Image: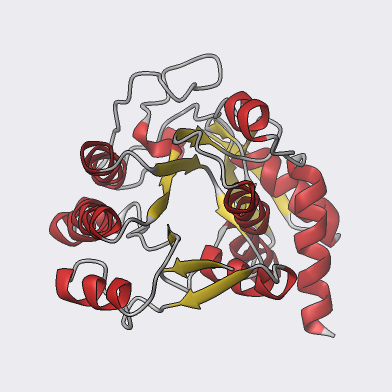
Amino acid sequence: MIRVLVTAKNGQLGQCFQNLAPQYADIEFVFKTSSELDITNKAKIEGAFGSHSFDYCINCAAYTAVDKAEEAIELADKVNHIGAKLLAESCKKFNVTLIHVSTDFVFDGKATVPYLEGDITNPLGVYGKTKLKGEQAILKTLKHYFIIRTSWLYSEYGNNFLKTMLRLAEQRDELGVVGDQVGGPTYAKDLAEAILQIIELKTTHYGIYHYSNEGEISWYEFAKEIFRLSGSSVKLNKIETKDYPTPAIRPKYSILNTDKISRLLSIKIPNWKVSLEKVYSNLLKQKV
C-alpha cells in the first residue's frame, strides 16, 4: 500500500484527487484542508508527517489570487515559497517524495515556441515570483521530488474561468474576452490522474515537468468554445490586454512543452477540447 498525503483538499485539484481516490485501491490517501494542515507551520507539518509513514506528499496548497497577490505580497510568499520550503524540509526528514504543483507564470511570455522545463524563468508578477521561489527552495532541499508546472487550471470545482464564463453569460448580453494571451487550458482531473500515474509507476525520474492539455488557444477562443457547448447567445467580443488592465501583468504566451512527461513517464495527455466537453457534461449532470 502506497501512503499519500494531499494538502489543500478543498481546492480544485484537491477535490479532483478525492473524486479519483476510490479508483486507486493500492493507494491510501490522507486528505488535509489548509486549516487542518497549515503548510506555513513547521510544527503542524512535522506532526502530520510523524503520525503516518507517507511515501508521497502532493502539495496542492497555493496562494493563487494572481491580482490580489500584488498587494498581499507577504501572504503569497508565505504560502507559495515558505510553505513549499517547509514541506520540502519535512519530506527530507521523513524520507517522503514531494510532488509539488507549480505554474506557467514562472515565465515572462516572451517566447514564441512552447516552454521547455529548462528554459530561463522570469516571472512578471508576485504570484509567479513566489511560486518560483517555492520551486527553488525545493530544488535546494530535495533530491526526490517532482515539480509539475501547469496552466489555466479549471474543473467542476471551485472558481475558475469556465464557471465564470457560464455565470456571466447568464447575466449579460455581451462580453469582452482577451484574445492576445495564448496558453493551454488544463482540466484539474487530468492533471490529478497524471500525478497518480507517476506515483503508481514508482519512477525515479525526478525533476521538473510540464503538464497541460494539448492545444494552444487564447482566452477568447476558450470562451468561444464554452459558449458553443452551452448554446449561449451572449455576444462575445475579442479584446486586447490593454483594454482590460489588471493589477498583475500576465504572460502573453505561456504554452508549456509537455514532451518530457509524455516521453519519460508515458503520460498520455488529452486535447483541451475533449476535456472541456467532459467537464461541461459533468456540470450539466450536477444541475439535474
Image side of residue 44 versus residue 106, left or right: left
Question: Quadrant location of the N terminus?
Answer: bottom right
Residue at the farthest top position: 112
Q: Quadrant of residue 16?
A: bottom right
Question: Quadrant location of the C terminus?
Answer: bottom right
- From the top left corner, tell me how far across and down residue 180 is, in percent: 54, 29
Residue shown at the point (63%, 53%) measured from the top left: 200
Q: Is residue 165 above or below residue 143?
A: below
- From the top left corner, tell me how far across and down residue 142 is, in percent: 28, 42
For the question of whether residue 202 can be seen, the reply is yes
For the question of whether residue 244 can be seen, the reply is no
Q: Nearer the viewer, residue 234 or 163?
A: 163
* Colour setup of the view: secondary structure
Residue shown at the point (16%, 54%) measured from the top left: 73
Residue shown at the point (40%, 52%) measured from the top left: 97
Q: Is residue 173 above or below residue 38?
A: above
Q: Nearer the viewer, residue 72 or 96?
A: 96
Q: Nearer the viewer, residue 36 or 155?
A: 36
Q: Is residue 98 above or below residue 243?
A: below
Residue shown at the point (68%, 44%) measured from the top left: 222
Number of numbered tags placed on the structure image: 0
Q: Quadrant of residue 257?
A: top right
Image side of residue 145 versus residue 139, left or right: right
Q: Nearer the viewer, residue 107 or 194?
A: 194
- From the top left corner, tell me how far across and down residue 88 is, in percent: 27, 53
Q: Quadrant of residue 113?
A: top right
- From the top left corner, tell me how far across and down residue 189 is, in percent: 66, 59
